[in-house]
Amino acid sequence: MNDKEEVKNYLDSCTSSFWKDVFNAELNYLLQYLEPGDRILSVGCGPAHIEQALANKGFNVTGLDVSQEAISCLPDRIRAVVGKAEEMPFSAATFDAVTYIVSLQFIENYQEAVKKTAEVLKPGGKLFIMLLNPESSFFKAKQKEPESYINKIRHTDIKAIEKTVASYFSLQTEYFLGLHGNAMVTSREPSDAALYIIRGTQTANLDLQ
């Protein structure tokens, strides 16, 4: 399956009421911590359903993705940049917040991506990483589907990812959002929650060398 077909299939799947509910839950989570006027970078933004909602609420949003096909779907209100997370083409201290909405685990060198993230965030800036939880029933069910996007994940050790992020940020973490088939429930149980969220805060005295 080529990039164009993958993006089309993703867009088609996103029209279901189930995935719309999931996107809204993720959006509402972010809105708890974002401040009006924040400049936001979304890494691995894809067709940018959540990012568009943020832009509609007045946030300044930039989307970064390696897929030209995905970036071409972005609305005009979002600045679209094609590029790798490991080679972010932005100046230091540019953004107030950076999001990885189920994207960091797919990046080849996530360690370098996290380091670049720390560089482009302003001191005190916010980081939101939503990881798929490999211990969840949702993850395990999707693994059994040969065409599932989950089978393209490069990194499933979420504690190793957390350790890398902790080298550059002060952290808070939590499990979030139980998914059962086509049902969404509130859950923060490690065996049940589909997402593991890492919230980081940039500090001014980090050594990024």
Image (tube, helix red, strand yellow):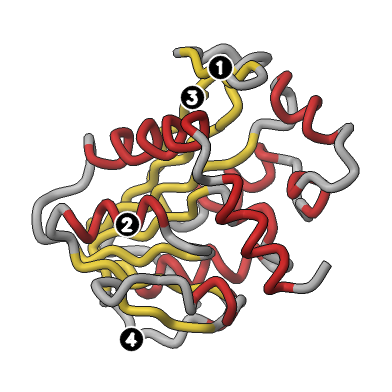
Q: Which mark is residue 91?
A: 4
Which residue is labeled 3 in the image? Answer: 176
> Marks 2 and 3, Cα distance to the nearest angstrom?
22 Å
Residue 197, placed above or below residue 13: above
- First in sequence, mark 1 or 3: give its number: 3
Q: Mark 3 or mark 4, which has the lower sequence index?
A: 4
Q: Earlier in the sequence, mark 1 or mark 2?
A: 1
Query: CB atoms at circles 1 and 3 under 8 Å apart?
Result: no
- Cβ atoms under marks 3 and 4 closer than 8 Å: no
| Amino acid type of the residue tagged 3 in the rendering | Phe
Relative placement, left or right, of 156 versus 113 is right
Q: Which dot, 1 or 2, sits closer to the camera?
A: 1
Residue sitting at x 63%, y 15%: 192
Other residues around mark 3 within 10 Å, as few (<14) / some (14–19) / many (≥20) = many
Mark 4 surroundings: few (<14), some (14-19) or many (≥20) residues within 10 A: few
- In the picture, which quadrant includes the N terminus? bottom right
Q: Earlier in the sequence, mark 4 or mark 2?
A: 4
Q: Secondary structure at mark 4?
A: loop
The image quarter in which residue 66 lies: bottom right
For marks 3 and 4, give the CA distance: 32 Å
Q: Amino acid at mark 2?
A: Gln
Q: Which residue is mark 1?
A: 183
Residue placed under numbered mark 2 in the picture: 202
Q: Quadrant of residue 145?
A: top right
N-term mark: 2 or 3 = 3
Callout 1 crowding tier (Cα within 10 Å): few <14, some 14–19, many ≥20: few
Contact? badges 2 and 3 (CB < 8 Å): no
Of marks 4 and 1, the one in the foreground: 1
Say left or right for 153 vs 92: right
Nearest the eye: 170 or 55: 55
Task: Assign a secondary structure to mark 2.
Answer: strand
